[in-house]
């Protein structure tokens, strides 16, 4: 049960049950959809992106606890950040969940997102954790297409 | 499935039903003694692929180690022996599904390729713009997408038979969907996501009455039910070797000889020709006309060994035992608060799809894996069916004859752990 608890930390379970910013952003000027065809996870990320800053963010969709909690905590952590700062955070987060977090320098950068370190022990769940971030990136780039983790 | 009534004695001692000894059978499968995450493997993902008995592993190994050669062309001893073994397997398949002739058995990669073959060969020859192909709500993507592709090529359209909340076909609706424009019915025998066993005889009789051919996706039926293609009177029947305890990469398309004779080849290449000049090629006879290129020889030989093995136990005994397991698992899962079983048809093969309140199927899968229990979580390649039930995904425990009541208990314990973790 111990490494399962590493994966399903209480913070993650809380966020999966009560996701933050779980709504359609009415004044969004950028949106993107993400889809994990393997397990059926679907997410839509809504952004109010102005003056190179994420001024508002929301998401909707359905998915497992990991993807939902990841989306919820992502929205909390990128609000108010520039595109480059958000990209930087995604890189750090990605390294963390594939188990290369130690090489990524200061883990303090990630703040609360560090609770996802347990994902690295479950390689099949990495896509669940990163789907919201890939979708955020697509929205930031204004690609307006569905991103897939396949 | 005509469910054989279990005897009182069998009920008293499940696992030894009607001369079936599950403990002995399990010894035939080397993988069943391994551990996963430090726990004994509980393999409940048989609808995805089945495990292989030692006799299958040995047959493949023996071919590769002692008589590997290309077949149908060599004049040397190894090739002759390989050809003999491969063609023997074709005859075993013929008897397994009671086809009239072995040339009606086309070896393909699997069910998916078999359906694509019919869509592209029979379909492109016979189906035109405005024609209709009838499928059902519970089809696997492999019995949807090939017909959609054919529709894009020809302008034909799909008509979909609806189902009720138990996961049974609405046969009155099916009758209405059969029109003078219907050119083909493509229907699954046993649903991979619900377990429903469809009443094929009536479905086929109704279509045949107006001259419409029927293709049956038998991928999930072949491991559980005795299939008799002549009694069913289906025109095509497709199944995969790896779900009947054989290797992956080998499967079967059965087709009535007169249909196959009239159909153009699916792929061109070696083995499917009688003679080739730059001006004209004469195609080979059945079944080789549809088997271009060097086939999966080891797979074909392995499939033959798998069929021998299944016959050795007997699908009748397998059916009785699996039905007991299904009943036991259905009662046990239904008793867990928050579990909802998706697929409650009266006639079911031994699989249970379920959702758990407040816990996504993918998380259930991870937690069960931690207990050594392998299940499938997701849409099971039946996304339209998931939409019909209003769920994004289900967890699916699919049982084989080597599973036990004790393994169901481990599954139930794992589900309780998931509830506890998310509680």
Image (spheres, helix red, strand yellow):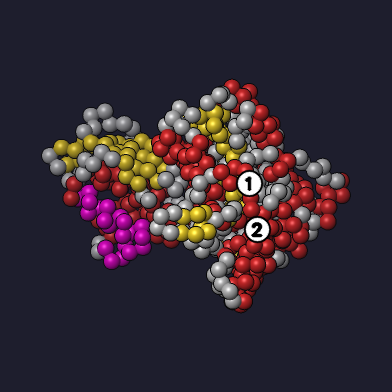
Circle 1 residue:
B257
Viewer-closest of B161 and B422: B161
Q: Chain of mark 2?
A: B
- Give the dominant element type of the magenta stretch: helix, strand or loop: helix
Q: Quadrant of residue A30?
A: top left
Stretch in magenta? A85-104
The alpha-carbon separation of the residues under discs 2 and 1 comes to 15 Å
Circle 2 residue:
B90
Q: How many marks?
A: 2
Q: Quadrant of residue B279?
A: bottom left
Viewer-closest of B195 and B154: B154
Q: Which one is in front in this view, the residue at disc 2 or the one at disc 1?
A: 1
Give neighbour class at mark 2: few <14, some 14-19, many 20+ (Cα, 10 Å): many
Viewer-closest of B278 and A5: B278
In the picture shown, does residue B304 fall above or below B1? below
Taking the spot 83% from the left edge, 52% from the top edge, the residue there is B18
Residue A96 colored in magenta in the image: yes
Q: Inspect this view and state whether residue B153 appears.
A: yes
Residue B167 colored in magenta in the image: no
Q: Secondary structure at mark 1?
A: helix
Disc number for residue B416: none
Q: Chain of mark 1?
A: B
- Which one is earlier in the sequence, the residue at label 2 or at label 1? 2
Give neighbour class at mark 1: few <14, some 14-19, many 20+ (Cα, 10 Å): some
Q: Inspect this view and state whether residue B339 appears.
A: no
């Amino acid at each position: 049960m111990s490494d399962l608890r590493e994966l399903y930390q209480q913070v993650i379970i809380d966020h999966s049950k009560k996701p933050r910013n779980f709504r359609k952003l009415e004044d969004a000027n950028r949106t993107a959809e993400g889809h994990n065809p393997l397990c059926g996870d679907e997410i839509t990320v809504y952004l109010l992106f102005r003056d190179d800053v994420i001024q508002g963010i929301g998401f909707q969709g359905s998915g497992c606890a990991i993807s939902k909690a990841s989306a919820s905590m992502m929205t909390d952590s990128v609000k108010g950040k520039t595109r480059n700062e958000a990209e930087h955070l995604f890189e750090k987060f990605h390294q963390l969940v594939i188990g290369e977090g130690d090489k990524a320098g200061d883990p303090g950068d990630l703040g609360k997102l560090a609770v996802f370190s347990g994902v690295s022990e479950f390689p099949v769940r990495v896509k669940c954790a990163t789907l919201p971030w890939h979708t955020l990136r697509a929205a930031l780039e204004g690609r307006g297409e569905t991103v897939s983790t396949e | 499935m005509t469910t054989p009534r279990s005897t009182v004695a069998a009920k008293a001692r499940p696992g030894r039903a009607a001369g079936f000894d599950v403990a002995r059978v399990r010894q035939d499968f080397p993988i069943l003694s391994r551990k996963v995450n430090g726990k004994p493997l509980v393999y409940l993902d048989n609808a995805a692929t089945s495990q292989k008995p030692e006799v299958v592993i040995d047959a493949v190994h023996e071919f590769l180690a002692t008589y590997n050669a290309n077949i149908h062309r060599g004049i040397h001893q190894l090739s002759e022996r390989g050809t003999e073994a491969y063609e023997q397997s074709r005859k075993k398949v013929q008897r397994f599904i009671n086809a009239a002739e072995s040339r009606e058995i086309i070896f393909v990669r699997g069910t998916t390729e078999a359906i694509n073959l019919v869509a592209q060969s029979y379909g492109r020859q016979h189906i035109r713009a405005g024609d209709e192909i009838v499928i059902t709500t519970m089809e696997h993507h492999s019995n949807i997408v090939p017909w959609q592709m054919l529709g894009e090529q020809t302008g034909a359209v799909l008509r979909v038979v609806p189902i009720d909340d138990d996961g049974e076909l609405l046969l009155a609706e099916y009758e209405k969907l059969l029109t003078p424009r219907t050119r083909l019915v493509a229907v699954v025998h046993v649903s991979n996501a619900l377990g429903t066993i469809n009443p094929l005889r009536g479905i086929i009789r109704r279509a045949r009455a107006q001259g419409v051919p029927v293709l049956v996706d038998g991928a999930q039926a072949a491991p559980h039910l005795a299939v008799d293609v002549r009694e069913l009177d289906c025109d095509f029947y497709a199944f995969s070797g790896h779900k009947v305890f054989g290797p992956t990469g080998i499967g079967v398309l059965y087709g009535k000889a007169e249909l196959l004779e009239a159909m153009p080849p699916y792929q061109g290449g070696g083995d499917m020709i009688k003679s080739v000049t730059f001006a004209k090629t004469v195609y080979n006879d059945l079944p080789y006309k549809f088997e271009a290129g060097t086939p999966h020889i080891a797979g074909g030989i392995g499939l033959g060994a798998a069929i021998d093995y299944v016959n050795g136990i007997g699908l009748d005994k397998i059916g009785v035992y699996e039905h007991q397991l299904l009943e036991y698992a259905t009662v046990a899962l239904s008793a867990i608060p928050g579990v909802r079983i998706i697929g409650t048809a009266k006639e079911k093969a031994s699989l249970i799809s379920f959702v758990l309140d407040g816990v996504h199927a993918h998380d259930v899968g991870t937690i069960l894996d931690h207990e050594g229990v392998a299940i499938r979580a997701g849409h099971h390649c039946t996304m339209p069916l998931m939409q019909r039930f209003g769920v994004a995904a289900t967890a699916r425990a699919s049982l084989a004859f080597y599973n036990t009541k004790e393994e169901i208990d481990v599954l139930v314990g794992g589900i309780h752990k998931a509830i506890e973790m998310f509680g």
